[in-house]
Image (cartoon, rainbow, N blue to C red):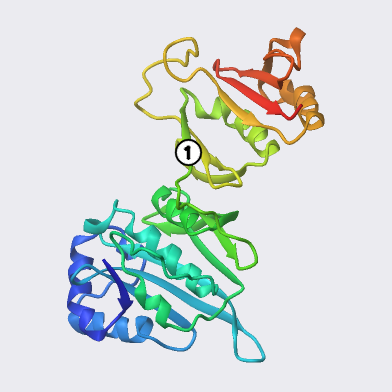
Amino acid sequence: MKLRLWQSTDASALLELVETSTDLERQMSLPGTLQEAQHLIEGQWLPAQGRAVFCLDDGQAVGLVGITYSAQQEDGSWDRGWVYYWIADRARGKGILKSAVRAVCDWALGQYNPPEEKHPRLDTELLGTLESPNLRRLELGYRTNNPASGAVARYAGFTVEGIERQKFLYLGQTYDAVLAARLRQLPAPDFSTGVAVHHIELWTQNLEQVRGSWDWVLTQLGFSSYQQWQGGQSWQAQDGSYIVLEQSPQVSGAHQRTRAGLNHLALTCPSAHKLDSLRDQAAEHGWSELFAPNYPHAGGPQHYALYLENTQGFELEIVAPC
């Protein structure tokens, strides 16, 4: 796969993508003719002041990564950029898009360094030949029910900043949107050696029964509300990992932590003082304490922790530094 600039001659390939890929109607006004495809490319994607739009090419166009610049300064430079991206169905699931978005965002912030070794599936050599706009801030958005787009954003170094409620309306259904940003002054996470935890997914028989208790404890520990959809919600940590709570129709029985599988989830707390405060408030938010007579050393004399159980029998251990 190669990252290159769009060309007017990509119109026929774009028409083919429109016919064979899903969800593209949410990315653009779909062209129906070759002439409309050419107008779209020439009017919105060819190189021009205030934007940089790249094509993903595996022999023909299969995807796009674009940035629209805004807030022009007195010296003519741009301050911010809005990032958007998509890829054809046939090229999904290979890690190509997230690598491309990461590279383009690095370039836009003036932080692109040509890799010492070529990416096994993606050639971004073009970026090393182009002058960066040296933007200060990059922004993007995606639907809360689109975890694949969220994964691309995290890999590209974006941090969730908020949720726009009922941002989009499609076919009578409203969708919340995640707002995320990446700042030039803050280093993006290094995924070159992998990440220990990507996400943890917990299933529940009754989401509404325990949603509030999970939301309280996770936000108290520094997680932020990340995604929300009918039947599920997630919360994201500072390092980009996240916890999912979902009421799946495939749940086959009640949680039992003494059976084989996950026994409990353990999370960190910044201080012993904060842990004591959580202990005092836990009962008000749907949690009961386990091993209370031995608090805070139920896990041993060198272990300062609070053990909680919710109404569905799920155990949560919160650990503070001794």
Q: How packed is label 1: few (under 14 Cα within 10 Å), some, or many (20 or more)?
A: some
Q: Is residue 284 above or below residue 179?
A: above
Residue at the extreme front: 116
Give the percent coordinates (x, y) of residue 21.
23, 60
Q: Is residue 315 above or below residue 215?
A: above
Q: Is residue 149 visible from the viewing direction of this image? A: yes
- Kindly identify the residue that appears in the image at 80 percent across and 25 percent down: 276
From the viewer's perspective, is 52 left or right of 80? left
Give the percent coordinates (x, y) of residue 226.
55, 46
State the SS at label 1: strand
Q: Is residue 39 above or below residue 266?
A: below
How many numbered marks have been drawn onto this rendered protein structure?
1
Quarter of the image with the N terminus in it: bottom left
Amino acid under label 1? His
- Kindly identify the residue that appears in the image at 30 percent across and 81 percent down: 41
From the viewer's perspective, is 269 left or right of 147? right
Which is more toward the observer, 139 or 250? 139
Q: Which residue is mark 1?
A: 199
Residue at the extreme right: 273
Quarter of the image with the C terminus in it: top right
Q: Is residue 176 visible from the viewing direction of this image? A: no
Residue at the extreme top: 293
Give the percent coordinates (x, y) of residue 247.
44, 29
Give the percent coordinates (x, y) of residue 127.
41, 76
Image quarter of residue 275 = top right
- Kindly identify the residue that appears in the image at 48 percent across and 59 percent down: 156
- Kindly identify the residue that appears in the image at 33 percent across and 64 percent down: 118
From the viewer's perspective, is 298 left or right of 264? right
